[in-house]
Amino acid sequence: MTNGTDDLDFDYDDDEDEVYDDEVAEPKQNKSLKWGLAAVVVLAVVALVLVGVVLLGGDPGKSTLDGSTSSRNAAAAGIASADDTGPVSIIINDPSCTAWVSISGNLSSTLSMLGHGHWNERDQSIPASAWNDDQKREYMAAGQVVRNAAAQTVGLVKLTPHRVMRELYEQFIAYARTFVEHIPSYTERDAALAGTAHSAASALAAICGAANNGSAAARGPLVEAQASPTKVASPGNPANPQRYLTGSNSVCADWKATLDKFGADAAEWHGMDPTIPATYWNPQQKAINLAVGPVMISLANKMQQLGRRSNNPTLQDFAELSAQYRRAFVLALPTYDPSDNSLANAATFLSTTVLGACASTAIS
């Protein structure tokens, strides 16, 4: 299992045991259905990053609200999602996915070659002040690779017709670039920036994977539509998107606690093999999978409530979409097919995109 929101490995090989090895290129099938546990493991790892980070009090993170003028300006600038102000929903298809698969696949494969193939195994707790010459070269090379990927993603901010996809692309760019800026003075706390970029990238991968493998089309229409948000984040400059959570937000502590609780409540389910379709479940496997449904619905409802409480339109979109993908996965359980695991992956990585952003609010 990779380190999720604390590691700039961008190693998304789904052949590993967990969704945190999700490839940003179209995901393959995981060997374990422990996506919920992944969030909990990330929380444990991010705990080190959280030291000294104030998660409670203060105003919510800054976010620009949509208005008719900004929408018209965005439309004029060629941003396809400028007029998307409705509720977020399962993405059935998106024209940006083909390009994202290529960009993210190149990013993953290039980073994996650094450090003589050991980049993903490095000790990210070592600060820049203690790097040897090889480590410094590897981080600088990684920074250039990530910077290039972020630059290539700018066009996708304009291309996607879905507001929430635009927001994910924007946040991948923003957090990736901020991490790169911190490389010369890197400390362990900065890993949360990389992890947030990793989660946004992986959420995009899973969303595109679910669209490409048909699970989104098969399950998405069955999910009850939600109400339109009262506020949406307006499109900014595609070439220079800003982090969506730069100040403390009162929902961050509850967000972490909610993921912790889910990890405990769904402990038995975490060990399930996602490559086995429902047709071949034995009685015990069937019982475990069906029992976890209400637990997931409770999680989805809580995430949605926290998103609406946050007073941050982008955070709310991520929370709402995570909830919708979780609900789609629950609906899939009685007739589960391995392709449906992309729905679970999307839900998890959307939730950890919020988790990582909360962990990095104190980093300027």
Image (cartoon, rainbow, N blue to C red):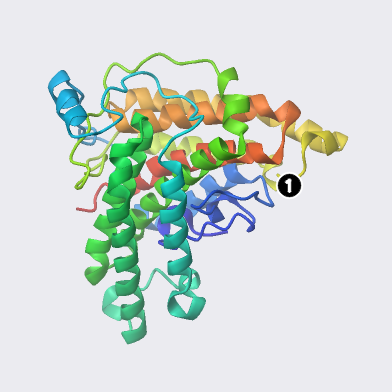
Residue drawn at x 25%, y 56% is 178
Residue drawn at x 51%, y 29% is 92
Q: Position of residue 262 (x, y in %)?
A: 57, 36
| Total numbered labels placed on residues in the image | 1
Asked if residue 94 can be seen in this view, the reply is: yes
Disc 1 target residue: 273
Judging depth in this view, the residue of 256 and 94 nearest the camera is: 94
Q: Position of residue 44 (x, y in %)?
A: 49, 53
**Residue with the most extreme right position:** 283
Within-10-Å neighbours for mark 1: few <14, some 14–19, many 20+: some
Asked if residue 295 can be seen in this view, the reply is: no
Mark 1: which amino acid? Asp
Q: Position of residue 305 (x, y in %)?
A: 42, 23
Quadrant housing residue 290:
top right
Q: Is residue 189 above or below residue 242?
A: below
Residue drawn at x 46%, y 72% is 119
Mark 1 residue element: loop
Judging depth in this view, the residue of 213 and 24 nearest the camera is: 213
Q: Position of residue 95 (x, y in %)?
A: 42, 37
Quadrant housing residue 122:
bottom left
Viewed as shown, does residue 120 lie left or right of 17? Answer: left
